[in-house]
Image (cartoon, rainbow, N blue to C red):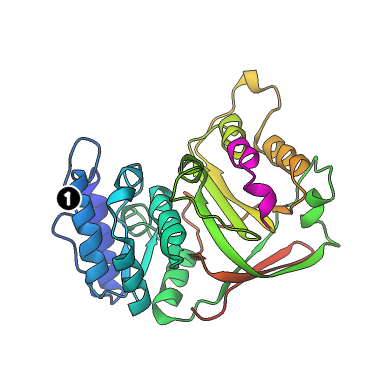
Amino acid sequence: MSDKAAFRRGVARLRALGHAVEVDPDALARDTRFAGDDATRLAALHRAAASGADVALIARGGYGLTRLLPGIRYAEVAQAVARGTRFVGMSDFTALQSALLAQTGAVSWAGPALTADFGVADEPDEIMLACFDDLLQGQGEGAGWRLPRERGAASASASAGAQDAQWLVEDATLWGGNLAVLASLVGTPYFPQVQGGILFLEDVNEHPYRIERLLTQLLYAGVLARQKAVLLGQFTGFKLVPHDKGYKLQSVVDWLRSRIDVPVLTGLPFGHVPTKVLLPVGAKVTLSVEGRDALLYWGHI
């Protein structure tokens, strides 16, 4: 763990909110850029599955879970989910969430990380805290957001955020997460084979042309066309350069909409940003759009 101060702030904040926090004995381990060697991290994951905790929360993202996927005992993790443990995380955690869904169909939660969200130097985001509390209380049943106004949208699917848009998708599997991590799993046993689902995506520190390249991989693999909707969350941390000459993130969105006959919605409040909702990866959901108001509803899980 590179930011021990943020780690300790996060633990203290969770305890101040009234939660009983059990820190894994290897939570602060370090091996080169990883949070411990592979065997250490696998053991920690399996301890979390056996703990009986209400929530198993990741400390941070980055990279490292992909190399662990063959060694994870998925049946044990799925049994923990069935007993009531909610596995929560994002970014690199997409690898475990995707593999768990592909291998067992079990539901996990895309949501905050300990250091980046609870361990911030100022106050944690109120919406994130409220969504996390809803999860613990069993009260969170959906997430809504206002679709941003967009320019340059040329296709019918691009007008999904227009004032007169009104449509409904029911009984669709919600899945996805970090775009780079998800694309890296294509062609492996750890990539969910979801048909007619709702795919949500986010990323950080990826220039728009890299985002397009990653989307192209999902496009050419036939993944995007098999979905009922694609939800784009927050793509942050990149910097445009003069060489782009007007090519920007909206250019990628418009390009994607021209390639698939699937609604592509933007502005989902999820990603490497303070304000994020929690999303049940692998759950059946309903997506409704009226004008610029979008709502994901999953009911009680």
Name the residue nearer the viewer: 40 or 270: 40
Q: Amino acid at mark 1?
A: Thr
260 relative position to 68: left or right: right
Q: Secondary structure at mark 1?
A: helix
52 relative position to 284: left or right: left
Q: Is residue 278 magenta?
A: no
Q: Residue furthest top?
A: 243
Give the magenta range: 216-227
Give residue 64's quadrant in the image.
Answer: top left
Give residue 199's quadrant in the image.
Answer: bottom right
Give residue 216's quadrant in the image.
Answer: top right
Taking the image as drawn, is residue 140 in sight?
yes
At x 31% / y 42%, what residue is drawn?
67
Measured along the vertical axis of the image, is residue 64 above or below residue 228? Answer: above
Residue 186 percent location from the top left of the image? 51, 43
231 relative position to 94: left or right: right
Residue 34 percent location from the top left of the image? 24, 41
Q: Which residue is the site of mark 1?
A: 40
Residue 90 percent location from the top left of the image? 42, 54
Name the residue nearer the viewer: 59 or 38: 38
At x 50% / y 59%, what residue is drawn?
276
Taking the image as drawn, is residue 270 in sight?
no
Residue 211 percent location from the top left of the image? 58, 36
